[in-house]
């Protein structure tokens, strides 16, 4: 039986005509993307299945949504993470965010600090970026794009379970500081040390799928932690807290 994501990608391919892409060109784009990011496996599935994506959606949800494909993902960061005119990185952009689509300039992003495909949205032209949770996963996002209603079969077969990981202590201070500085994107080790003064420390909040790599990292880098199941309401509350860290 096909997964929910595979069924949605089949529907995406049914609704639009995706031009063929030469194999050599496809490999070139894949190599370019892998050098820049480590993307979630589910999003790679979308890029590879829809590698020559060329379309704009307008419906009750979107004014003019462009969904990036394999050949447009890097260029799609222009105006958000990169200024192509000045050929400079835009300093106020969070480097962990990857723009996967744009609706009349409003970006939809994945946050690569997470271990899921939750999609975040922000309004452009506001002076600063204020990203908010838009969809719990890539499948929910695609359903909104394709106007495909959620079915009872989906909800039964793919229940959502939210968890959070909380650092409760450290067994190796030096290793823990290195990992946490990179994880939170801190500008200095002093900033990371200040975080550790306030244990327990929330380090992840989201879907329970795909957390194993983060848990392995916590064990490997000398951090003790607790894993707790939480409600959707608590998950949204945690997201607001994480954005303010």
Image (tube, rainbow, N blue to C red):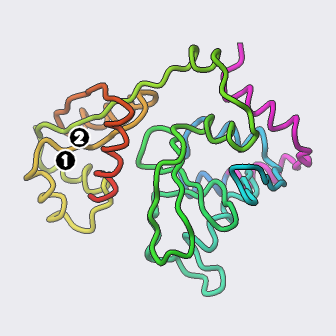
Dominant secondary structure, magenta = helix
Q: In terms of secondary structure, where does tag 2 sit?
A: loop
Q: Residue at x 84, y 54 (%)?
A: 54
| Left or right, residue 141 beside residue 174 | right
Given residues 235 and 202, the one toward you in this image is 235
Q: Residue at x 80, y 38 (%)?
A: 12
- 106 to 82, vertically: above or below: above
- 115 to 191, vertically: above or below: above
Residue under pointer 2? 221
Dot 1 surroundings within 10 Å: few (below 14), some, or many (20 or more)? Answer: some
The image quadrant of residue 47 is top right
Q: Residue at x 66, y 56 (%)?
A: 101
Q: Residue furthest front?
A: 60
- Residue 195 picture location, percent across and down: 15, 55
Cα separation between marks 2 and 1: 5 Å
Residue under pointer 1? 175
Q: Which residues are magenta?
A: 1-30
- 184 to 76, vertically: above or below: above
Residue 184 image label: none
The image quadrant of residue 141 is top right
Q: In terms of secondary structure, where does tag 1 sit?
A: helix
Q: Does the segment drawn in magenta span residue 12? A: yes
Q: Does the segment drawn in magenta span residue 18? A: yes
State if disc 1 and disc 2 touch (CB < 8 Å). Answer: yes
């Amino acid at each position: 039986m096909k997964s929910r994501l595979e069924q949605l990608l089949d529907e995406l391919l049914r609704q639009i005509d995706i031009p063929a892409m030469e194999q050599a060109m496809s490999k070139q784009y894949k190599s370019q993307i892998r050098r820049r990011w480590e993307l979630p496996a589910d999003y790679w599935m979308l890029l590879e299945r829809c590698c020559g994506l060329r379309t704009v959606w307008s419906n009750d949800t979107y004014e003019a949504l462009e969904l990036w494909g394999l050949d447009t993902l890097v260029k799609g960061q222009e105006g958000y993470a990169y200024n192509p005119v000045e050929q400079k990185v835009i300093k106020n952009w969070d480097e962990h965010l990857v723009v996967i689509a744009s609706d009349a300039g409003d970006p939809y992003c994945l946050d690569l600090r997470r271990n899921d495909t939750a999609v975040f949205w922000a309004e452009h032209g506001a002076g600063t970026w204020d990203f908010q949770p838009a969809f719990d996963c890539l499948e929910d996002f695609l359903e909104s794009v394709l106007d495909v209603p959620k079915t009872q079969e989906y909800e039964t077969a793919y229940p959502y379970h939210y968890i959070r990981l909380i650092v409760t202590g450290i067994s190796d201070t030096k290793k823990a500081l290195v990992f946490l500085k990179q994880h939170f994107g801190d500008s200095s080790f002093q900033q990371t040390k200040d975080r550790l003064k306030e244990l327990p420390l929330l380090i992840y909040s989201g879907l329970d799928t795909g957390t194993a790599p983060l848990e392995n990292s916590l064990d490997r880098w000398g951090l003790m932690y607790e894993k707790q199941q939480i409600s959707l309401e608590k998950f949204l509350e945690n997201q607001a807290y994480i954005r303010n860290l």
